[in-house]
Amino acid sequence: MNLNIIHNFIKELPSDPIKTNTRRQVNEACFSYVTPKKTSNPKLIHVAKDFSENLGFTNDDLKSKHFLNILTGNKVLENTNPYAMCYGGYQFGRWAGQLGDGRAINLFDVEHNNKQWTIQLKGAGETPYSRSGDGLAVLRSSIREYLCSEAMYNLGVPTTRVLSLALSGDEVMRDMLYDGNQAFEKGAIVSRVSPSFLRFGNFEIFSSRGDHKNLKILVDYTIKHHCPLIGKPSKETYIDFFEEVMQRTLDMIIHWQRVGFVHGVMNTDNMSILGLTIDYGPYGWLEGFDFGWTPNTTDAQNKRYRFANQPNIGLWNLYQLANALYPLIDDAEPLEKILENYKNGFETKSLVMMKSKLGLFEDDAKDQQFIKTLEDVLQLTETDMTIFFRLLSNFKKDGSLKGLDVIKDAFYKPQDVADTIAQQWRDWFERYCFRLEKENLSDKERHQKMNSANPKYVLRNYMAQLSIDDANNGNYDLIDELFQLLKQPYAEQPKNEKWFAKRPEWARHKIGCSMLSCSS
C-alpha cells in the first residue's frame, strides 16, 4: 500500500504521556496511543470500493492480506501510531465527565487529492476510555453502521463514511436490550472514515476541567486544518468558528428532517464538530409519520431525542459548546446572537425544505400554515413518510387524479381513511391544488424536483435486520444488495421495487426493527 500518511493530529496536539493501555482519567491530553487487539480469524465481508479510491487505495490493495490485517487491527501500518481520543459529553442532558473513544481506534490519517481523512476502527479492542466495556463490536451493529453511513452519503446528508466491514472470528458477549439477557454474538470490525472525528465533547472536556490552554490548542488546530478560511487565532476567529459549527449542525439536522432520519442518541459526544452525522447506533427512519417517534429503547420514556425534538436538541448541544468555548472569547453576546440565528435559521430553512418536498418554490405567506395542516393530517392514521412524499410527486395540478388515489399505498390501514379522515385529506388536496396554481412549473418539472428531494429508498430498520439475519447465517449477499440499492436512493430502480414498500407487519414489534438500544 502506497498511502500518503500524515501525522498532523498526533504531532500538533498534546498526547497522553502514559503509554500503558489501562482505563483511567486522562488529563491535559487530546489522545492516548493504543494498539488494536488482534483477532482470531478475520474475514472481510464487504469493502466500499468506489470510496476507497478517494483514500489512495488500489484494487490490488483491497484484495491483499495486508489490507485485511490492517483493517481488522491485526497489524499496524508502518510509520503509523494508532490512537484513541479523549472527550467528554452530556448524555441525555447530564454531564457524564470523561468518555472518549471506548471502542474506536484511529489508525492513521491520509491525504489524497488535497483532502485529509482519518481512518478509524470501531470494535478493535480496549482503550483507556473503555470504562466498563470491552472495546469490541458485534456484527449486528457493525452492519447497521456500515450500510447507514453510505446510505446517508448518497441521500446527500453530511456524514462520516465507511471503508470496510469484517468479521473478527471472535465471539462477543452482549446484553442486546439491557434487560439482563446476555448472549454471545459474532464479533465484527467496521472501518470508519472522516475528515475528522472531533466532537463537541473534545472541547467540553477541557473546558469542564478548566484546562483553557489545551482548549485553545485544540480549537486552533481545528480551525487550521478544517476551517482555514476563518483566519488566524483571535477572539473574532473563535466567534466565526462557532458560527461555522452552528451552520453546519443546522444544515445536517435539516437534512435529517427532510429524509425522516432519527439519530436516537444526540448526546454531545455524538455531535461532530464538522456537522457530520456520526455514531450510528439506535437510529431509524420514520415509517409512519410521527413527530414523537424515537427508535431508542433507552429513551422510550422521556423521548428526549424523538424526531420532532432533534432541532431543539441541536440547539441545546450548541449551547453547551458555546459554554465550553466561552473562556476563549470572554463575551457572551456574540455567542448568544449565533444561537438566536440558529433558531431563526431553522425556521427559514425548514420551511424551504418542506416546500421543496411539496414542489412549492414560489412565495406564499400561507405556506407555513399549509404545511402544518399537512403534518396534522399525516398523523390522523399511520401514513408512511417516505412513500407518501414520493407518491405525491405524481399528483396533477389540474386535479385529474384524485389525491387519495395517488397516495393510497402510503397508508398502513387504508380502511381507516374514511369519513372524517378522508374528508380532511380531500380538503388538504383541494388546497394543494389551489396552491400549485401559483407555481410556474409543469407537472413533469415539479415531479422531477420533488423526486430529487424525496428519496424512494431508505434503509428501513427491517431491511437492515434482514441483512443481519442472513449474515448471522453466513450469507452476505443482502448486505451488498442493499449497499448497491442505496447508492441511488432517488432513482426509480424498477428492478428493486420490492424495497419501495411499507414496513411489513412482522417487523412492527420485532427487536432490531422497532426496538433498538445502544448495545453494540
Image (cartoon, rainbow, N blue to C red):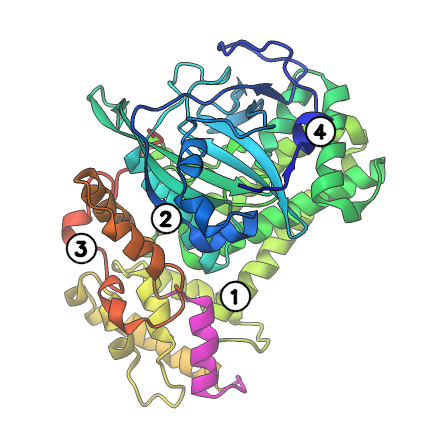
Circle 3: residue type: Pro
**Residue closer to the observer: 156 or 442:** 156
**Residue closer to the observer: 222 or 434:** 222
First in residue order: circle 2 vs circle 1:
2
Image point (63%, 15%), residue name: 16
Up the image or down, 163 lies above or below 80; here it is below
Crowding at dot 3, Cα within 10 Å, few <14 / some 14-19 / many 20+, comes out as few
Q: Is residue 440 covered in magenta?
A: yes
Q: What residue sits right under mark 3 in the picture?
A: 504
Is residue 322 found left or right of 47 in the rendered image? Answer: right
Secondary structure found at label 2: helix
Crowding at dot 1, Cα within 10 Å, few <14 / some 14-19 / many 20+, comes out as some
First in residue order: circle 4 vs circle 2:
2
Residue 2: mark in rendering: none
* Region rendered in magenta: 438-455
**Residue closer to the observer: 210 or 316:** 210
Q: What residue sits right under mark 1 in the picture?
A: 368
Question: Disc 4 versus disc 2: distance between alpha carbons?
Answer: 32 Å
Q: What residue sits right under mark 4 in the picture?
A: 218
